[in-house]
Image (tube, rainbow, N blue to C red):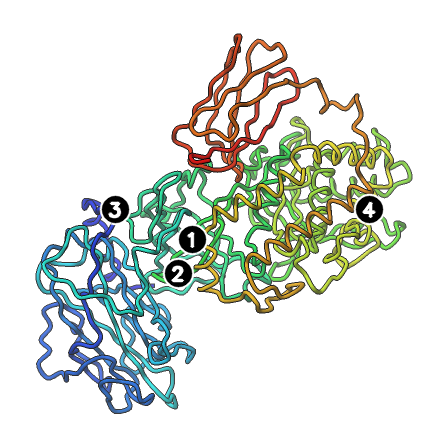
Amino acid sequence: MRKIASSAVILAVLSFFCGKVFPQHAEYWSLLVNAEELWSYFPGTREPPSDWVALGFNVDGWEKGPGGIGWGDGDDRTVISRVPSVYLRQTFQVEDPGTVVSAFLFVDYDDGFVAYLNGIEIARANMGSGYRPPYNQYAVNCNAEAQLPSGGVPARFLLLPEHLAILQKGDNVLALQVHDCNATSSDLSSTAYLAAGFSTQPPSTVPLPAWMPDPSAEKSHLPIIIIDTYGQQIPDEPKINVAFRIIDNGPGMINSPYDAPNHFDGTAGIEVRGQSSQMFPKKSYGLELRDSQGEEVKAELLGMPGESDWILYAPYTDKTMLRNAITFYLGGRMGRYQPRFRFCELYLNGNYHGVYQLTERIKRDKDRVDIEKLETTDTTGDAVTGGYIVKVDKIEGLTASDYFISYPDITFPNSRAYRWSWYVPKARDLNDQQKNYFKGFIKTAETALNSSSFTSLQNGYPRYFDTGSFIDFQIINEIANNVDGYRYSTFFFKDRDSKGGKLVAGPLWDFDLCYGNVDYAPERYATNTWLYASYGTGEGNCMHWWYRLMQDPAYASALKQRYSILRQGILSNDTIMTWIDSNVTLLGDAVDRNFTRWPILGQYVWPNSAIRYSYDAEITFLKEWITNRLNWMDSRWLVPVSATSPTQQTSLSLSLFPNPFRETFHIVTSTACDEFSLEVTDVRGITVFSLSGIKPSSGSVPVSLPGVSDGVYFLKVTDGKTRPVVSKIVKKQEF
């Protein structure tokens, strides 16, 4: 963490920024600091004066030379003797700071550095956390190498609005300290450029170097998230405070990392999350929105209901970047809560980090898992019976108080112990009465499931399980052939007995190792094996529950009926392939940026089932695998839909025209109804338009969507009496 004095300066800068209005886009770009010009430099043989970063510092006595400045690699313009560090300064002028709306710093360094603008730190790499490293402190590691000599591009650091607010009219100074990694290192390099984007043409400009990416081309249809840790390393835990900003100019608009934050601009706590995924260089993060005092606050982010806790999920081993997303989407369309999400692009400490999913964290909330809040005083009667969110998962890193083990009846063949983690409330917030109640509930439910009368409505599993949720959970896990299904990241929740009180399966979570994306379990790569059957015969922490449930003819029949109904619409090939195609289009050029940052196409990343050499090939495989999987499942589960099925009530009959449409389409109902409501959702499941109390008359009902961008949408029409009708509609300006 920074020293208090430094934090005070940052807060002062932030206060200044709050009153400053920044234009949205840069029209002109120019170098403010050119590495090839003269720098004042001080070899790190001793500590420089404490005010060496200040604008007014006197550099008399410092040496001068063109950048890069360093030793040992034979490509420096200014060669110095071997030292553990070097300090550099270059003064530059800004005629009107108010016209500088964007800026980025390129630094070619070996092995670590800290950069300052007018005395305020603006970037840091490979130097750990802290204020100013002493002259003889070494970089964290020796992994950094200068890129320009070999035709590469230096590391880039995006300057945030509060950094731009530091600029002054007239003289400004960029200062850097660059450090070696150890006493036996072979080289030290330091080359820096500062480029700025202006809203109006400045009096003079210096062209950007040919190797420098064109800022005007770096635009996205996706929201952009900006995180600045102010030099801190993001730990596994606990969360550290960081600047958290979102740029989202609205549907159909283009976003740029150089735009001012306009959707969210505040503070968040952040930590690295995940288990096996932590080994990947592209990390996932847990977020908690906070106020200036460090207290959590709720906010609506990117069209999702307000909350404080969020996940920045990093698709890495899944090179389609779609497997988690399509699972959440389909699960949500099936009528059960699944975490909502938005694709976005992340810049961390000024560096581009690729495509991410901003996703809701599973938690108790009226807009997430809607169950009663369990207070510590709820120890008896109905109050102690809910609400709980738990999961069956790995227990690495947990203490004995964080989980419990349930033991199915040992008379059941190949039964295994299951490891249940307390999720909401956390273990530390539960008392012994509450823990003992839930443990007892699970033991009783398992005993009923394993008994000879397990199908009994009075004494069997139906008394304890919300059967419909178990069916939907099984259908999705089987379609995905999820290697972690029924054993890891397997969530359940239970509300109070007065509100139903049965154990509900879900929400769904962690589906990156599925849809054929795994090599250590060949049966999971295959499209013609049952997940529940193989796990039901016993494997580690794999739950036999669904294997046992399928031995109940009534459960198996209901599952096949549900699957067959879903295959007619929500789980149809057309719905799934349309979603995939639409989201590939949505990602657009972000795909190329992501795989430029993480060049893993054509490379093995654990546990890829095969190496494919393009994004298109990854998408083709996903679509073919799902098609083959559904065809095989159809041959086993597809049955005629029962006429008595409650989901097969008489439905509204309607037609739409035109479809595709430009601005307005018309709904024509051919069955009588007093009134109906409609909801339009995009391919992510986010509602973009809704209207209720529509009273149809003769003729058609016009529906206009003027503010909605082109794309594929789903229209749901409900009259409150019959089964809702869902139709696909396409908005397209040009045909």
Mark 1 or 4, closer to the camera? 1
Mark 2: secondary structure: strand
Residue 352 is marked as 2
SS at badge 1: strand
Q: Earlier in the sequence, mark 2 or mark 3?
A: 3
The residue that mark 4 highlights is 547
Q: Earlier in the sequence, mark 3 or mark 4?
A: 3
Answer left or right for 350 relative to 236. Answer: left
Question: Label 2 is placed on what type of residue?
Answer: Tyr
| Residue density around tag 1, few if under 14, some if 14–19, many if 20 or more, within 10 Å | many
Q: Is the residue marked by circle 3 packed among few (<14), some (14-19), or many (20+) residues within 10 Å?
A: some
How far is disc 1 from disc 4 in space, using C-alphas? 41 Å
Q: Is residue 249 left or right of residue 415?
A: left
For label 1, the residue is 345
**Dot 4 alpha-carbon crowd within 10 angstroms: few under 14, some 14 to 19, many 20 or more:** some
The image quarter in which residue 207 lies: bottom left
Q: Amino acid at mark 4?
A: Tyr
Residue linked to disc 3? 24
In terms of secondary structure, where does tag 4 sit? helix
Q: Picture quarter containing residue 137?
A: bottom left
Residue 398: image x %, image y %? Answer: 61, 59
- Give x and y (percent) for residue 344: 44, 49
The numbered mark at residue 296 is: none
